[in-house]
Image (tube, rainbow, N blue to C red):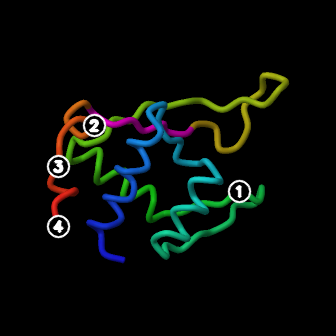
Amino acid sequence: MMSKPRYRWLLNRLRRQPGGLEECSPDLIVEYSKATGAKMLYRLNDYPRCPQLIRDFGKLVQHKLVVRKRSFLYDLNGSMVAPRSTYIYRLTPAAENFTTWVDRE
């Protein structure tokens, strides 16, 4: 799949989920991989990882359509788990309310 349809898929998913998306969410990674055909790898702790998803989020941040915020991960006992942190992505107001270059055919 070309890059523009992948960006469009991510923006539409973010528009449906106003709380934001976490880049290491297993559900998001599997859904993205099925929708776009992107390669999915598994970490040692059996969590999926998709390098293409991370690159696409980075490109959307670079174009100022999405903002990212770091979130640290802890287990129920309060100690950090692997991966230690992840990013949560949210739409910028411009991408949320207006048609962007990604949305145009």
Left or right: 14 with respect to 28? left
Up-down: is 81 above or below 1?
A: above
Front residue of 50 and 10: 10
Q: What residue would you read off at disc 2?
A: 96
Given residues 27 and 69, the one toward you in this image is 27
**Residue position for label 4:** 105
Distance from label 2 to label 1 (Cα)? 30 Å
Secondary structure at badge 1 equals loop
How far apart marks 2 and 4 lie (CA) works out to 18 Å
Percent coordinates x, y for residue 81 in the rendering: 73, 38
Mark nearest the camera among 2 and 1 is 2
In depth, the one of 78 and 102 nearer the eye is 102
Q: Which residues are magenta?
A: 86-92
- Give amino acid for label 2: Glu
Name the residue at 29% across, 44% down. Answer: 61
Residue picked out by circle 1:
47
Earlier residue among tags 2 and 1: 1
Residue 91's image quarter?
top left
